[in-house]
Image (cartoon, grey):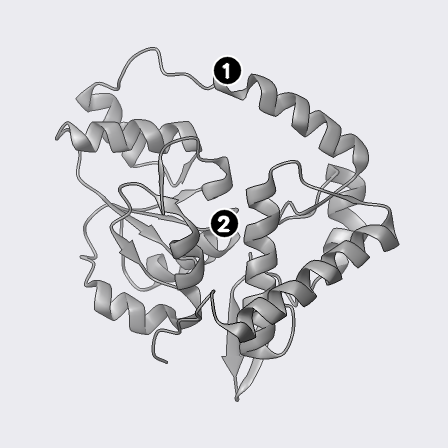
Amino acid sequence: MSIIKIDMNSPEFQAEMKKTIEFTDKVNKQFGWVYNPQAEVNEGVQMGLARNKIMYGKRFCPCFMVEVVDEKPRSVENRICPCKPAIEKEIPEDGTCHCGIYCTPEFAANKKAEMGIEDVVHTHSRGLTKDEAAILLNQSELDGDELTSLLEARNLGMVEFKLVDVREHMEWQMGHIKGADKLVPTSSFFAALDDAKLNKDENIIVYCHVGSRSAHCARILSDMGYTKIGNLSYGIVSYGGEIER
């Protein structure tokens, strides 16, 4: 499969985006949920839902990989928005769905309060030493602060790794982590991986929107013989560093 690109400015996409926003508005109203106070989370999910509707005819959750088997698309965990796991488990137990767009009013209020102190608690008192950077780079799961520190260490020549975005081309255009080296979209993963020409023995860190697609891609890469794979656990929405658009 070739790499698929959708023009965010096309009339087709803009029309579908409008329908998707109306759809998510209706879902919130139906279940008594509210949107995430982080507007970029909602916009990213809505754009992913619109994209999947255009591509596959269904609003598959954009945080999970969609596979085409016998010319029929299916979500890895059969996630179609609003998905059953979100309704029955995630929102009742965690206050928010996996993608973060749908929240209970209580969760949203707490999240908004947390955002007010985020800049205070996520600060770096010092940079990593070379040994610390090497140890951190070998972890299979990284949080946003750890990736920020590793990018700083890479800029200083302490470590080498490739940062790979596995979201879609449209999401990359909306904004990607400064320092990302490659885009390998999950919808055309193997073709894009061939084009990326990554070395199976080099350190690779993958990321997506909230960490689900990248975790899936990390497992695929490991199965293919890539030996040093790290995943940004909670995706770009958890990353507090610089974003390029």
- Considering only order in the chain, which callout, 1 or 2, is on the residue closer to the N terminus? 1
| Image vertical order of residue 222 relative to residue 40, above or below | below
Q: Residue furthest top?
A: 125
Q: Is residue 214 left or right of residue 137?
A: right
Q: Is residue 242 left or right of residue 71?
A: left
Please name the residue that numbered disc 1 is placed on: 121
Q: Quadrant of the N terminus?
A: bottom left
Q: Residues within 10 Å of mark 2 (few under 14, many from 20)?
A: many
| Image vertical order of residue 234 relative to residue 174, above or below | above
| Image vertical order of residue 218 relative to residue 153, above or below | below
Q: Residue furthest bottom?
A: 70
Q: Which residue: 19% across, 49% down? A: 202
Q: Which residue: 27% across, 60% down? A: 225
The one of 228 and 79 positioned closer to us in this rendering: 79
Disc 2 and disc 1: Cα gap in Å? 22 Å
Please name the residue that numbered disc 2 is placed on: 209
Q: Could you tell me residue 112's position as x and y percent?
A: 67, 27
Q: Is residue 72 left or right of residue 90?
A: left
Q: Could you tell me residue 37's position as x and y percent?
A: 66, 36
Q: Secondary structure at mark 1?
A: helix
Q: Which residue: 19% across, 63% down? A: 197
Quadrant position of residue 53: bottom right
Q: Is residue 76 visible?
A: no
Q: Mark 1 belongs to which amino acid?
A: Val
Q: Is residue 32 visible?
A: yes
Q: Could you tell me residue 51's position as x and y percent?
A: 54, 68
Q: Which residue: 56% across, 70% down? A: 52
Q: Mark 2 belongs to which amino acid?
A: His
Quadrant position of residue 15: bottom right
Q: Could you tell me residue 64's position as x and y percent?
A: 55, 60
Is the Cβ of the residue at disc 2 closer than 8 Å to that at disc 1? no
